[in-house]
Image: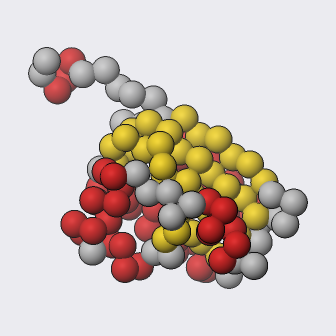
Amino acid sequence: MPAENMPVVPLAVDVRRTPARAAVCVLSGDLDIETLAPAREALDLLVAERPRALVVDLGRVDFCDSSGLNLLLQTRMAAADEGLSFHLAALSGPVRHLLELTGAKAVFTIHETVDAALAADG
């Protein structure tokens, strides 16, 4: 099937807050130029809320392109500007591959699980 006829896989965004005032943003589906608007909106709102920590769960992301990576980098910088702890957790294979391929893995704090990310932040 030609790329222009490929269906756009929506990106689901689920946000939960922990009793310790951390926020977890779970992304599911494709994180790319066609679908990243809901993720951008949720992450921008979360940074503005200034939780104790912001964890992005990427375990259910099936695909991530450079625009998705750019969103994660921008969110990391925005969180740093606000003095927020920012973590990536449960990287799916495609996300892990993209971060390794681009060298971006070195700039993120990455954990195997969301619970590990939350525990690391105290």
Residue 44 makes an appearance in the image? no
Residue 91 makes an appearance in the image? yes
- Dividing the picture into quadrants, the one containing residue 7 is top left
Which percent across, then down, holds residue 48? Answer: 71, 63
Q: Depth check: 49 or 88 in front?
A: 88
Which percent across, then down, holds residue 17? Answer: 78, 54
Q: How is the image coloured?
A: secondary structure
Does residue 64 appear to the left or right of 85 in the view shown?
A: left
Which percent across, then down, holds residue 24? Answer: 67, 55
- Dividing the picture into quadrants, the one containing residue 81 is bottom right
Q: Depth check: 82 or 90 in front?
A: 90
Tell me: residue 48, above or below residue 37: below
Quadrant (top left, top right, bottom left, bottom right) of the N terminus: top left
Tell me: residue 77, above or below residue 71: below
> Could you tell me which residue is drawn at 29 percent across and 55 percent down?
66
Tell me: residue 107, above or below residue 21: below
Q: How many numbered marks does the figure carry?
A: 0
> Could you tell me which residue is drawn at 66 percent across and 77 percent down?
120
Give the residue at the far right of this rendering.
19
Which percent across, then down, holds residue 37? Answer: 49, 42
Tell me: residue 60, above or below residue 72: above
Does residue 88 appear to the left or right of 114 in the view shown?
A: left
Does residue 59 appear to the left or right of 120 in the view shown?
A: left
> Could you tell me which residue is drawn at 57 percent across and 69 percent down?
87
Quadrant (top left, top right, bottom left, bottom right) of the C terminus: bottom right
